[in-house]
């Protein structure tokens, strides 16, 4: 349940930012769609790992910037699971 709440909070954060995070919101939507297609469900960890893999495989400076910002927001808004 915590994971679903966390995913919803992250998605809502991106949506509420409007045009400020338009590229990041579009990227996150694509990432979530790809993860769901591959795994059937999405977790914050899967999003983070996907974004890191994309960072490692692209050299496009603009795309790198969007990936970094998206990753920074997702990591910053993901609850720490160290106590679990």
Image (cartoon, rainbow, N blue to C red):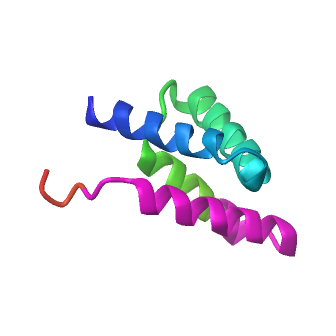
- Name the residue at 74% across, 63% down: 66
Spot occupied by residue 76 in the image (x, y as percentages of width and height)? 44, 63
The total of numbered circles placed on residues is: 0
Residue 60 appears in the picture as rendered: no
Tell me if 60 is positioned left or right of 6 in this view: right
- Name the residue at 51% across, 24% down: 40
- Name the residue at 54% across, 45% down: 13
The picture quadrant where one finds residue 80 is: bottom left
Residue 46 drawn in magenta: no
- Up the image or down, 4 lies above or below 52; here it is above
Spot occupied by residue 47 in the image (x, y as percentages of width and height)? 53, 48
Residue 57 drawn in magenta: yes
The span shown in magenta is 54-80
Residue 42 appears in the picture as rendered: yes
- Name the residue at 45% across, 61% down: 75
- Up the image or down, 19 lies above or below 4; here it is below
Tell me if 39 is positioned left or right of 23 in this view: left
Spot occupied by residue 10 in the image (x, y as percentages of width and height)? 49, 44
Tell me if 77 is positioned left or right of 18 in this view: left
Tell me if 82 is positioned left or right of 6 in this view: left
**The N terminus is located in which quarter?**
top left
Dominant secondary structure of the magenta stretch?
helix
- Most extreme residue toward the left is 83
Front residue of 76 and 57 = 76
């Amino acid at each position: 349940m915590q994971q679903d709440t966390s995913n919803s909070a992250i998605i809502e954060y991106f949506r509420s930012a409007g045009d400020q995070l338009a590229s990041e919101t579009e990227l996150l939507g694509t990432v979530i769609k790809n993860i769901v297609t591959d795994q059937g469900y999405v977790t914050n960890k899967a999003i983070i790992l996907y974004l890191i893999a994309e960072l490692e495989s692209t050299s496009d400076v603009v795309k790198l910037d969007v990936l970094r910002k998206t990753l920074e927001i997702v990591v910053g808004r993901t609850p720490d699971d160290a106590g679990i």
